[in-house]
Amino acid sequence: MAKVLRKEVQDYLDVFNNVTLPAMLAAGWKQTIVNAREGLATLTKTYTPAGPAVARILDDVIPCAGYQVPVRIFNPDPTQALPVLIYYHGGGHGAGSIPVYDPVYRNLAARTGHIVIAPEYRLAPENPYPAGEIDAYNVLTHFRPLLDSLKIKYIDRVSIAGDSAGGALCAVLNRRLQSEPDVKVYRSILIYPCVDYSMAGESLKELATGYLLTTAKVAWYHNVYLAHNENRRVVSPLYGEFTRNMPKSLVITAQFCVLRDEGKAYADKMKAAGAEVEYINMENMTHTFLNTESLNKEECDFVYGKINEFLK
């Protein structure tokens, strides 16, 4: 396994760790949900090119009881009936949004030939656990009436995907669907997922600082999300029952990501339970590399290609 970061990524981190961050701290910077959201948005806008054109993009809400989740629908070919991919964005359960992830959704729609549904699920601290999980499930189980009402042609085959906290939501759905055979998911894709809120993975110690997402920031996000003294092991998707009834899954981690070991542990537990799983560790990469495509285009192209291959 390679032991160094991709040069473009290392150059960016050298400036961030040795110039940008010290200047911020010297000026009195303190982590808040406002600057967490701003930071992810700025990083993505700066280092992710605009995605490809998509034939039709619509905004609407999921028709369900309770909170009606806003969604944006990316349809690469309205003349054809296409399969559906629901993609839950990352951001630690507190950051990220549909506008921030626009290039990712566009790439997924264009490169996989799927209708991509992007949910604006509720975020902490305004809406802590389990609001996001409720929204993720409602989108999965209520998207069909919306597509029908919009007269969108689609194949009734849905897959789910997400990165970081969005990968956690996919893992939660995987666990829940084991006992709900009527809710069918064709494939599940988890990209550097956060699946262990107890933070037991060794990579959290090994890669604690210096690689964009730090262990301290992971802990901060967990504290924002799990605001009511939840048992962190109990609510973690890594623990609990794993069976062969989980959706066939693709798990992608990054070599220099603090969440690497918990992602691998998740894939290992799926395999041990007899579920179908493919695991890939992206060498030379950090967390959030899909949001820094200009620094690692080859790796992003590989991942989008792999997702397309896995879905087909």
Image (cartoon, rainbow, N blue to C red):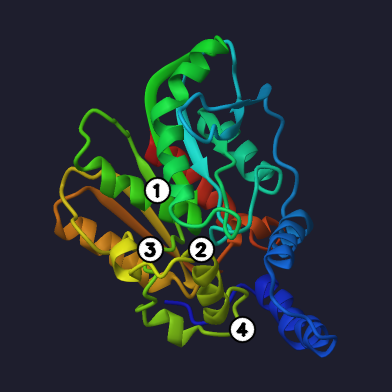
Q: Which numbered disc flags the more N-terminal residue, 3 or 2? A: 3
Which residue was labeled with disc 3? 195
Q: Amino acid at mark 3?
A: Val
Residue at the (39%, 48%) spot, across then down: 170
| Viewer-nearest of discs 2 and 1 | 2
Q: CA distance from mark 3 to mark 1?
A: 10 Å
Q: CA distance from mark 4 to mark 3?
A: 22 Å
Which residue was labeled with disc 2? 225
Q: Amino acid at mark 1?
A: Cys
* Label 1: how many Cα within 10 Å (few below 14, some 14–19, many 20+): many
Residue at the (49%, 52%) spot, across then down: 166
Q: Quadrant of the N terminus?
A: bottom left
Please, what secondary structure does the residue beneath circle 1 have? helix
Tell me: residue 280, above or below residue 134. Answer: below
Seen from the viewer's position, the closer of residues 33 and 188 is 33
Q: CA distance from mark 2 to mark 4?
A: 24 Å
Residue at the (35%, 69%) spot, across then down: 232
Where does the image place residue 141, in percent across and percent down from the top left? 38, 29
Q: CA distance from mark 3 to mark 2?
A: 13 Å
Please, what secondary structure does the residue beneath circle 3 have? loop
Residue at the (61%, 72%) spot, across then down: 6
Which residue was labeled with disc 1? 170
Seen from the viewer's position, the closer of residues 271 and 280 is 271
Q: Quadrant of the C terminus?
A: top left
